[in-house]
Image: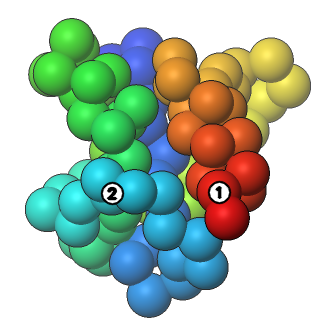
Amino acid sequence: METDRVLVAIRKKDIVYRIPGTKFNRCCSRCSAVVGIAPSGRRLLQAFPETVVLCGICARADRNLMEEGSLQVAPGAVDELRDYFRRD
């Protein structure tokens, strides 16, 4: 990878749960699949525009990315999921 920061996103066709505010205006940097970017991911991309966006399939194929300890959650992503599942 050319950058130290990678955002792993779910392909639009594979999304089961859609966090409110998710947009489908980005594509995987490797396979060009349309991916969903939740608000936390968009904030990360705004703060770090050099971030590479990969779909989950391409990310799994990257052995370096999948090394233990190399993945982190985008700030706010856990709260977005918690809020989604707590809604009525």
- Furthest residue toward front: 88
For disc 2, the neighbor class at 10 Å (few under 14, some 14 to 19, many from 20) is: some
Instruction: Please state the total of marks drawn on the protein image.
Output: 2
Q: Amino acid at mark 1?
A: Arg
Mark 1 lies on residue: 87
Residue 49 coordinates in the image, percent (x, y): 15, 22
Q: Quadrant of the N terminus?
A: top left
N-terminal of the pair, mark 2 or mark 1, is 2
Q: Quadrant of residue 26?
A: bottom left
Q: Residue at x 62, y 30 (%)?
A: 79
Residue in front for this viewpoint, 16 or 1:
16
Mark 2 lies on residue: 22
Is residue 4 shown above or below 74? above
Q: Secondary structure at mark 1?
A: loop
- Furthest residue toward bottom: 13
Can the viewer see residue 58? Answer: no
Q: Amino acid at mark 2?
A: Thr
For disc 1, the neighbor class at 10 Å (few under 14, some 14 to 19, many from 20) is: few
